[in-house]
Image (cartoon, rainbow, N blue to C red):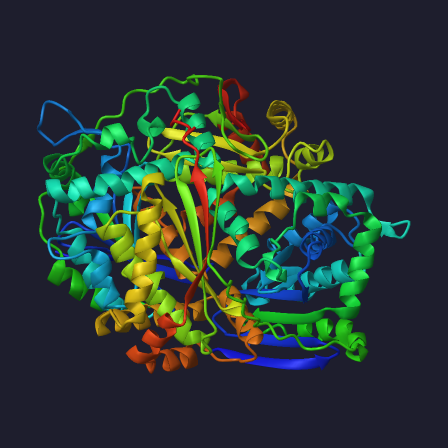
Amino acid sequence: MLEFKRERLGGGVSFSRVTDKKFKSCSVKVAFITENSYSSSAKSALLFSILATSNAKLPSRTALTEAAEELYGSYISSFSSRIGDYVTAGLECGFIADVNTIGKEVISTKAVGILLDCLFDPQLEDGLFSEEYFSLKQKELCDAIAAYVNNKRAYAIREARKLIFKGEPAMYSDYGSLEDATAITREDLLDYRRYLFDNAVIEISVSSDGSTSDCEELIKERFRPFANRNVQDITYRTNSPLKAEPLFSEISESMNQSKMVMAFKSDYEDIYTVKLFSTMFGGAPFSMLFENVREKLSLCYYCPSVYIDTKGTMLVDSGVENQNLTAAREEIIRQLHQAAEGGFTDELLENSKRFICDSFMSNYDSPYNMQDWFTAQMTRGTSFTPDEICDRLNSVTKEQIRDCAASFRLDTVFTVKASGEAVNGQ
Amino acid sequence: MTDKQIIRDEALDEQYSIIHHKSGLDILIWKMEGYRTTEAMFVTKYGSFNNIFRKAGQKDFTAVPEGIAHFLEHKLFENEDCSAFALYAKTGADANAYTTFDHTAYLFSCSQNWDKSLEVLLKFVQEPYFTRENIDKELGIIGQEIRMGLDSPERRCFYALLRALYSEHPIKIDIVGTEETIAKITPELLYECYDNYYDLHNMFLAIAGNVDEDKVIELADKLLRDCEDRKVETYIPSEPRDVCQKRIELTCPVGLPIFNIGFKAEPLSGEERVKKSVAASVALELMSGTMSSLYKRLLDERLINSTFGYDIMAKDGIFFTAFTGESEDPDRVCELCIEEIERVKREGFDQRLFDIVRKSTYGQIIRELSSPERVCSGLMVSGMMDGVDSFCQIRALRELTAEQCRQAVDELIDPEYCAVSVVRPE
């Protein structure tokens, strides 16, 4: 049986605990959350990737990896991503529950100890991060940014966000730009760590079989001094303003299939009604876009919709042949108008409810998914379980969905057009 | 007559059942107490390899167009009245299908109504409906999928490696075929492939998570049709020991050059394949994993980034290992990998590191046992091999020695049979 508890430790630090006896593995995450800016995403990504390499007690990457691997393949890794206008970055640690080790060894406190040492006692040389790890991780970050172009679909979405959220912190990508990444110095990074420790909202979460109380005490003890900080709560939801006129933008790349990203914006209040609408519109294999744009009209290979609740924005990204770009765009808009006029069946709505609820309920089986679920709840200031959300979704009416659809307006259409210098299969 | 086998691992305290159903179908069921999710896969041992075949008693082999197994998978989702997605929409399950080199799988994941979803799965896979009209419609969709695949540099690099390693074996054929080959597909050819390979004796059903064995058998009794064991024989041309080409180089838009360095080995089968794959996997981790001296050297020389890794592919008639990643200098990476292989052949592995990697791999297996999706995938892998159960991997790991890993390098990772594929920026 799943239990969830969230407590405020003070000073902008919160501690969440998800437990379910059936979980065989455990996950601990420490997230530092600040407003995104042109340089913070690159700094966040670089800082935590360096912190994950070593600490004062395990001063080399090899020593740290060996120590973690010896704990039945435990791992310490960094993460950095966006929540709307904010960047959330930090360290996480995963390990199997003590009861599942051979001989019931206690590995949980050791694994968490390594994580905490990486955060609080980093390996420094002359008061700075090691030149070796700094240059290594900076190169990896630059390589990852250069590799954006490898995945054409993700590349199109990343470029589109710059236009969709122009002038808002959400426009900056997960890793920042190549210029941002190369401009960072070791001094900058140490300053940034200090800045985060002083100013960031800190979200700690533990997801386990319930046997990690010693780990939880260790973590709370290390964060006790943070209770005196003066850190304001974050309001994560800042709907992106609708442009006066839809923006149409196109670039060209040497590739075989064009990518089109369309953004629709709305101030509709209840995000769960919107999520249900987005599922019915383009988020399921029986949705309006899948059935009509792909299956009936063969206008694109894929065209799902996804709702970014923190920005009040729904994206439809598609893989389209050049000759179908206009027809696909018009049909997607036509489908939205049809939904806004109530042109969908009760059956489609009921199927969408079943689909989204089934998906939400399956989170219960994974410690990692439940951790992410309650992180999303935290950004909404709630702590609903999947069951509670499904109860709400099941009471949404056709009229509410119609009104929700009618509230969306086209904001941006961004196309990466296949240049025609297509590569062949060999 | 339906009979049942229990497969158990005492040390893990885990077990699953194999039901040999009277229809000829084997049903693998792993009930996971306390889980809400059900994962199911209906699998035929039919993939892109099976391009030339004959029925028992037939003299001549029939050759069918490349990509037909994948095409058939797409078309099977559509019966006479509606698509399978429309049927699943009534149950809430998330359904999908995929085709690989040696099998095609139809799957669903759900957290409610698993029995209704299983009914849908068992029914639609047994009800083919192919017409000229619905084939023509699918040509457009699959054509788009083919062109989208050409935009993936990682995919192109992988297929280039296959073409470099294998001169005769059909693994070098793209699973989706080409626009030219799929244009030759007819309803008659689809029915011929279906009749030969979608014979329940050539198929199995794997289910893990929240499931009731008696209910599965009841549904199988009701829905599975008795069918003749066609004993279809696939023609696989004999493959020379040598690689086909030492190197293939391509260009396309990528951030950094992408490389695959492959080592062709003699194919293996049954339990020996599992044992040697485990040995090769641990050997590759010891040689090139994050704790290895090779990994450190490649990082120190700034030759690799976080994308560096290794792969093993072991199928009927196929066994190769590969190092993969991005580098400014793939040739230098290859040189250092081969140097390390030669060193290991002479000196063997460090016992302490071997113990760590073995323990870490054990932890990884425990983690997988808490995911219905991973457990179901494990059942699928064992279902593909006669006489191999799902615990074979962990048994092999328990018995593995450092010396066996060295022998695996000797036998399976031989620089004499090395080929390289590189995708460079345009």
Give the residue displayed 74% in from the left and 63% down from the top. Answer: A116
Viewer-nearest residue: A211 or A399: A399
Image coordinates for residue B283, horizontal then vertical, percent: 56, 36
Image coordinates for residue A31, horizontal then vertical, percent: 66, 65
Residue A74, quarter of the rendered image: bottom right
Residue B132 is left or right of residue A261, and the answer is: left
Viewer-nearest residue: B47 or A211: B47
Whether residue A54 is visible = yes
Give the residue displayed 62% in from the left and 71% down from the top. Answer: A205
Residue A155 is left or right of residue B200, and the answer is: right
Image coordinates for residue B237, horizontal then vertical, percent: 28, 21
Vertical side of B148 occupied by A161: above or below = below
Give the residue displayed 56% in from the left and 43% down from the top. Answer: A148
Whether residue B100 is visible = no
Residue A101 is left or right of residue A332, and the answer is: right
Vertical side of B253 occupied by A204: above or below = below
* Quadrant where the image shows the C terminus of chain A: top left
